[in-house]
Amino acid sequence: MSRRTFKRIQIFAIIIICLIAWTYFNNSSDVVSEKNYFFDRKSRDLVETSFGLFNITPLEKIRRDCGELCDTSRLGTPGPFFDHITAKIKCQALFKNSLIDREHGQVEAPNEIPKVLWNEYTMNGRVEIFNYYFDEHSLGKRKHIAIPVWTQSGIDELIQLASQGKLSGNYGINNTNALRDALKHSPGVKDGRVLVIGSVKPWAEACVLEAGAREIVTLEYGKIVSEIPNVKTMVPYEFRMAYLNNTLGEFDAVVTYSSIEHSGLGRYGDALNPWGDIIAIARGWCVTKDGGSLTIGVEYNNNLDYIRFNADRCYGKIRYPYLTTNWKQFYRGFSGKGIQRVHVFTK
């Protein structure tokens, strides 16, 4: 082989190596940029979406106050049903931040996840995304729906049906009885002061009262009028202000059924927030007494976590541990008809 031919081969080899290196680093840069787009981006605060301009600044402030609670890359330890996750929860900051409870401000509910939030909603690709769209604004006001009024006679009738195992609630008799079963295993419910998160019709409240609760405070997006002496209702702003004014008090137990999985998806008028569900349960932890409990029914599939945007979430071994940060797994109830399954946790 001549020296000239050898030199050409060397030059060709160098060119190939440079091309490979350029491709590798270019692709790596793209991956890093995509992975850290929300936290490390240097782009403008307003990003374009199919539903208009989206302001990312409020979420940056929420993420700051949320701290490690909203870091869904943290590792957990094995638990009875799924991993157990712990974090330092900054309760005062979570209640002080009014941006958490803001409305999305759009004419219609968001119909897609903005690219800038994709990795936060999917937990860096670990959660599947499907389309299932609703526009049901109810944060502080309702479209085409009269403000619900809860009466003593109405709740008495529901309690009687529950005691007979015949209360259909919103999801059928089997699911109602699954909640009733879990409440029998929920420390603090009997003779306790209970926070119910998310309710329009008081079927869950009827189950809680049937289980022996002394008092209920229901937290719901939209306004509800309760004429029942031992059942009070609050919208998010009232709840937050009561905590900050030290007039809310502590609860012996928290109960929520088919509500939390909607938080932060925009369906009910709330602003997009990838950690909306996690923060809602963390706030419940903040106002629960030591030894109290969380009884929660959400869509559950241990082997498949997914979001049907903007309808709801389904929790499994990936997101459920973060949803119930700091809560200790205590009891798993039987599943009713459907994919809702009730779990009980303690503080």
Image: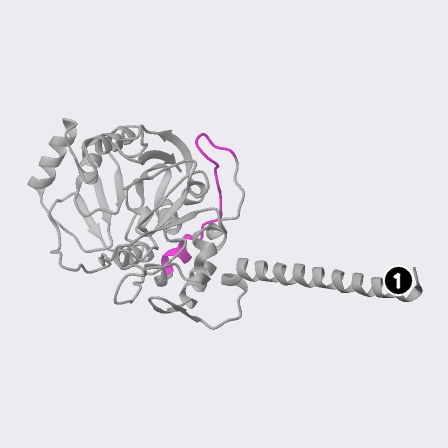
Region of the chain picked out in magenta, as a range = 78-96
* Horizontal arrangement in the rendering, residue 165 relative to residue 278 (left or right): left
Measured as percent of width and height from the top left, residue 158 is found at 12, 36
Q: Is residue 4 above or below residue 159?
A: below
Residue at 17 percent across and 38 percent down: it is 169
In this rendered view, identify the residue nearer to me: 78 or 303: 303
Q: Is residue 58 left or right of residue 144?
A: right
Figure check: 136 above or below 212: below
Residue 273 percent coordinates (x, y)? 38, 57
Position of residue 97 in the picture relative to residue 163 (left or right): right
Magenta segment's dominant SS is: loop
Residue 283 visible, this orientation: no
Between 3 and 103, the residue placed more toward the observer is 3
Which amino acid lies under the numbered mark 1 shown in the image of this protein?
A: Phe
Can you name the residue that lies furthest to the front here? Answer: 1
- The image shows residue 9 at horizontal and vertical percentages of 83, 62
The quadrant in which residue 96 appears is bottom left
Q: Position of residue 235 (x, y in %)?
A: 24, 55
Q: Secondary structure at mark 1?
A: helix
Give the labeled residue for mark 1. Answer: 6
Q: As rendered, which of 129 and 100 lies closer to the eye? A: 129
